Amino acid sequence: MSEIATARRSVVAGVGSALPARRVDNAELIERVDTTDQWIVERTGIRSRYIAGDGETTASLAHDACVKALEHAGIAAAEVDLIVLATATPDQTFPSSATKVQAMLGIPDCIAFDVHAVCTGFLYALTVADSMLRSGSAKTALVIGAETFSRLLDWEDRTTCVLFGDGAGALVLRAEEGTRGILATKLHADGRHNDLLFVDGGPSTTGTVGKLRMKGREVFRHAVVNLADVLNEVLGIAGLTSADVDWVVPHQANVRILDATARKLGLPPEKVVVTVDRHANTSAASVPLALDTAVRDGRIKRGDLIVLEAMGGGFTWGAAALKY
Ligand code: UT7
């Protein structure tokens, strides 16, 4: 590994996550659609997911994740001067769910806005917050990925309804001088593919919320190529190679995508954090949820070199390299 230069960086001060109360395993879905536990496990690795109930929303889950992240960081909510919330399932079309979280945390004034890049949303939010912290526009940020995708699902479409779940994850980022923190980020979008994964509604078209539609096999094909490429790109920008990586924290869409991407990079499967079995695909929430899981169970330790990656509707995709 080449030496990491001292600079003003966005350091991860704390992590937190939140899940709805209700856990739904594959057996429950078999009663709703023509599927089997074997098909879901073999094709995706998913065994269960959490589904939001009455009163549980994107903003409420985001708030709960933020409380835990602030506690983990030992930082008071009053110190937060920036909230960036990644979601494709906001509580309302407007105001932003970020401002709802701000109000719930009792922060009278800060910068707060939502970012929308579907499953890549957290990487987009992290990149925006990192730029603002490094440029000096903010000092302490909450970067959140939070979703209630269950409310966009067509519960009669077996090709999609078994794949997704709800949840939230949050990071507290602090601008600090040093060698720890975010080392590099890289984002992409290619709107030519926006008909492969989309919602068939919206305020400016049908006036309805709509339902999620996906051509899964085609998304899968693009995902493995794009994710391996962007991980190599971000490692290159940071002056690192895959041999320097302690942990990959990927977007959790399908365990076969995680395995194939790791193989392409020559990374052993033990270095890949997998939560898709428990959480399913929680879109923008999946990366911070997986990061929080691996920090809290003791796998990820201070000083570890971590790469994050995600790919989603648009298409959008991106990656980040950080020293935890
Ligand atoms: O988060 C954003 C990024 N999203 C992703 O990365 C998702 C990427 N795609 C995938 O993970 C996979 O493509 C899926 C899990 C969505 C599907 O797996 P697949 O191996 O690509 O299956 P397929 O779509 O090619 O379908 C194979 C068969 C079809 O039947 P026929 O046409 O071969 O008779 C489907 O109708 O499996 C059938 N099928 C199911 N069978 C039982 C599809 N869904 C189900 C189901 N239960 N739930």
Image (cartoon, rainbow, N blue to C red):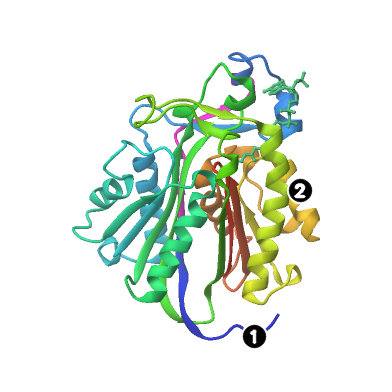
Badge 2 element: helix
Quadrant in which residue 35 is drawn? top right
Left or right of residue 67: residue 269? right
Q: Residue furthest left?
A: 108
What amino acid type is highlighted by mark number 2? Answer: Asp
Q: Which residue is mark 1?
A: 3
Q: Give the percent coordinates (x, y) of residue 257.
A: 72, 44
**Camera-side residue of 3 and 324:** 3
**Camera-side residue of 255 and 117:** 117
- Residue stretch in magenta: 16-28
Please give the label number shown on residue 259.
2
Magenta span contains residue 17: yes
Label 2 environment density (alpha carbons within 10 Å; few <14, some 14–19, many ≥20)? some
Q: Give the percent coordinates (x, y) of residue 263.
A: 80, 54
- The answer to whether the residue labelled 1 contacts the one labelled 2, judged by CB atoms less than 8 Å apart, is no
Left or right of residue 258: residue 164? left
Query: First in sequence: mark 1 or mark 2?
Result: 1
